Image: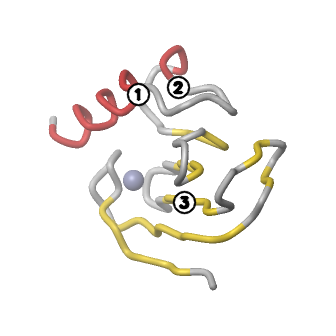
Amino acid sequence: MDITQLVRCPNCGNYAQRRYFYREEIMGVVCPNREIIQTECSSCDYLMVVCSRNAQVIEAYAPGIPTTIHPKIGQKLTPQFEKAVLAKAIG
Ligand SMILES: [Zn+2]
């Protein structure tokens, strides 16, 4: 069953939607436990889709974060990206 939560957007601080859903493969990325977490903010266009098991990025977009540190699809969420998003949310 799909679960949707209201969370704070890590990029702009407004309300964002976090959706948990089950899919074995999404956009060419295989998720071992089929559990996908998608965080989407309509205020700033922030989008993060990761596999909950191995933190493999399926899709990531954060406005205002340099594309050079954006995690690539199929790679793990990079600490630099998380730090940049966090720094932006605080600052
Ligand atoms: Zn946002």
- Answer with the quarter of the image where residue 80 lies: top left
Report the amino acid beneath label 2.
Answer: His
Query: Which element carries disc 1, helix, strand or loop?
Result: helix
Q: Which residue carries the number 1 mark?
A: 81
Q: Point out the residue furthest to the top here.
A: 68
- Answer with the quarter of the image where residue 25 lies: bottom right
Residue nearer the viewer, 27 or 6: 27
Instruction: Name the image quarter holding the N terminus.
Output: bottom right
Q: Residues within 10 Å of mark 1 (few under 14, many from 20)?
A: some
- Mark 3 vs mark 2: which is more N-terminal? 3
Q: Point out the residue furthest to the bottom here.
A: 1
Q: Residues within 10 Å of mark 3 (few under 14, many from 20)?
A: many
Report the amino acid beneath label 3.
Answer: Ile
Cβ–Cβ below 8 Å for labels 2 and 1?
yes
The percent coordinates of residue 26 (x first, y second) are 78, 53
- Mark 3 vs mark 1: which is more N-terminal? 3
Query: Which element carries disc 3, helix, strand or loop?
Result: strand
The mark found on residue 70 in the picture is 2
Instruction: Name the image quarter holding the C terminus.
Output: top left
Q: Point out the residue furthest to the front here.
A: 32
Measuring 84% from the left and 43% from the top, which residue is drawn there? Answer: 28
46 horizontally vs 50: left or right: left
- Mark 2 vs mark 1: which is more N-terminal? 2
Residue nearer the viewer, 53 or 18: 53
Mark 3 vs mark 1: give the one in front: 3
Q: Which residue carries the number 3 mark?
A: 37
Residue nearer the viewer, 84 or 42: 84
Mark 3 vs mark 2: give the one in front: 3
Q: Is residue 67 above or below residue 43?
A: above
The percent coordinates of residue 10 (x first, y second) are 32, 49
